[in-house]
Each structure stands twice: as structure tokens, then as C-alpha cells.
Image: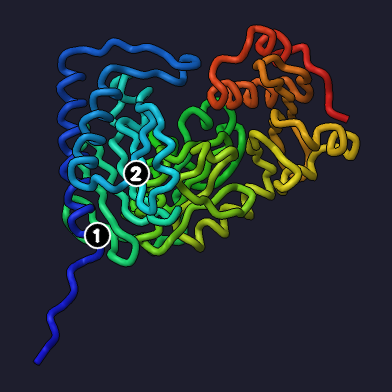
Amino acid sequence: MTAPSSPPPLQDEQRTAERLARQAGELLRVHLARGLTVEHKTGADDPVTAADKEASELILRGLSDAFPSDGLLSEEAADNPERLGRERVWIVDPIDGTKEFTTGSPDYCVSIGLAVGGEPTLGVVYAPATNELFSGVVAGGVQKNGAAAGFSPRTDYVVSVSDTEFKRELHRHNLPGMAPSGSIALKLARAAAGEVDVTFSMSPRSEWDIAAGHALVRAAGGDLRRRDGRTIRYNARRPHIEQGIIGGRLEAMGWLEGELEARRLPTAHLGLTPADPAWTVLTEADQVALREHPGVFVRHAGGRALALLVVGGDGAVERAEGDAFHLERLTRDVTRALGTLAQEARDRALPPARGIH
């Protein structure tokens, strides 16, 4: 007699997340039809709308009702430190790609991820404008709109890159296969479904940007990691990945890492410490002088610093050094991470800037 098969892993959680993602997507479509009022958190590249907050409330309420013992983390909700003691934590971005949402681009999504013991385990990404639902559980595979999906076997890799980073910087490089787009969660979902192969960023990301997408690429057999090669764990006290990321098909990731190194394409590293590999890009004198400083921020490539910011606890910039272009990019990343810097930061971090010796 054949033993009954066990139910798919996390089936109830997956169905609940899919339902809530679709409901949030419908709410976003309603807001678009009514017209949006857009505010900005730290600058023009960091908008927020009432739709972000309402979608967040809808999703968190639904998850809390269904799984009351789980922790919750959302970009648009006040953080509750109780999540740090929970084994399972839902990590939500109600609109990943808010800039695209507010400008009429279809390249935005609802992102709902579940981390178990710090590992990305379940991901649901829904694109309301195109009615595409990507869903997956590690060890359970990936589906797009209910049909099985997975990595493409192509060897001419498609590299999904940030449209912002492409316009400002990447267009000057001859990296093969670049396809600019908006939402990082949607990039990862499309990689897991075989529509692209790999993605990377130069600027840092936060847990809510990538948790669901990370689970999807893992469910497809790939991964996502920091640009310095270290793994990404979730439900951290400060839920930010303080450097660029790279993820997708494993073989495509290996190829892309070689291409990035050969072209010396930079990444930021925020909150640099002596334990980080990028610490070695500092001069020996700075490694001694800044060892205990909590506000060290660097943009680097090819084993050398391109720009350095040292920011005090009051948000005032103590040092701003390096190439003006890279210093401007680093300042944007730091501003988004810390909130609006003191006016002194803007005055000192932008040109004229001193070189790094």
C-alpha cells in the first residue's frame, strides 16, 4: 500500500501570502486610478505614497491574523524589536519600486518573504500592472501564475541591472547582456522564472527589498549574496545589507563576478568595520585611526577606495575624500541609509573634494 504523500512545505503560508499580495496589488491599482499624492523620504529617488502605507497595513494585518506567533518587518511600519526573538519572520515591501509606481512604469511589485531561522524560505512577488504572480518555497520549487517555472538554460546571460545605476554609471561600461529595470524584488523573481539570469547592484539594499526574491532564487536552485561574497542572513537588528548584492543562477553569478572584477565596477560599503573584507581598501593610517569609529562609509573597486565619508553621530561629515563622482554616489547611499544628512554633510561631501592617498 502506497503511503500518503506529505503536503507541500509551507502550503498554508504560501497561499496566504499569495492572497495578500493580490489584495495589496488591487489596492495599488485603485490608488493609481484615483491619483497619487507623492512625498519623499530622503530625496527624489526615495518617494512614498499613502498606497505604500495602506498596502503595508493590509498585508501585516493578514499575516498577523493567520500566523500570530510570527514576527513582522515592513519597510512602511514601525519596527517592533520583538521580531528579533521569533524563529519565523515575515519581511514585507508593500511596493518595491515606488518610483516606478509613481511615474507610470509597470516595473513595481508587492514583495512578501518569510525567513525561518534567518534563512529566506518562502517568497511571493506580485506585479499588479502585468498581473504576474511569482511564488516559491525552498525545496518546493517556483511557480509563475500557477505554472511551474525555473532557470533558463541560456548561455548568453541576461543581466538585470538597476535602471537608475544604468543611467548614471553602468551605461559607460561594456558589460554584456545588461537589461535595465526598476524593482530589485521583480528582478530576482524574473531570474527565478528564467526570464533573466542574474542581477547585481552597486548600492546597498534592505531586507525588505530582497527577502522574497532571495527565497525565489533559492527555490529555483540559485542564491543571492553580498558583493564581497558573504552570505545574507535575515531578521537582523538593523535590517540593511550595507553593500551591493549579486544573485541569480549560480553559474551566471560566477561569470558575472569575474566580469565585475575585470571592469572594476564599484560597490558601496556602509558602516565599515575591521571585520569586513573592504576594510583593507583603507590606508594603513586610516585603519588605525578609524578602527573604533561607527560611521565609516566607502565606495571601492579593484582593491582601492574611490570615495570615503566619515560621519559623526550627529550626522555631520567629519571627512569627505575621493573622486567627486564616486563621492556623490556614496553620499546618496549614505543619505538613504541614515536619513537626511545635516546640511554640513551636503556642503562637504560634494565637490570640491580631497583625493584619497
Could you say where residue 272 lies in the image, as x and y percent from the top left? 69, 37
Q: Residue at x 33, y 38 (%)?
A: 92
* Relative to 98, 285 lies left or right: right
The residue carrying pointer 2 sits among few (fewer than 14), some (14 to 19) or many (20 or more) residues within 10 Å by Cα, namely many
Q: Nearer the viewer, residue 196 or 4?
A: 4
Give the mark nearest the N terminus, 1 or 2: 1
Looking at the rendered structure, the kind of residue marked 2 is: Gly
Per the image, the residue denoted by label 2 is: 71
Label 2 sits on a secondary structure element that is strand
Front residue of 195 and 291 = 291
| Residue hosting label 1 | 10
Q: Nearer the viewer, residue 123 or 9?
A: 9
Q: Residue 3 falls in which quadrant of the image?
A: bottom left
Quadrant of the frame with the N terminus: bottom left
Instruction: Report which quarter residue 65 is drawn in.
Output: top left
Residue 339: give x, y in percent of width and height. 54, 19
Residue 250 appears at what percent x and percent y? 49, 61
Name the kind of residue labelled 1 in the image: Leu
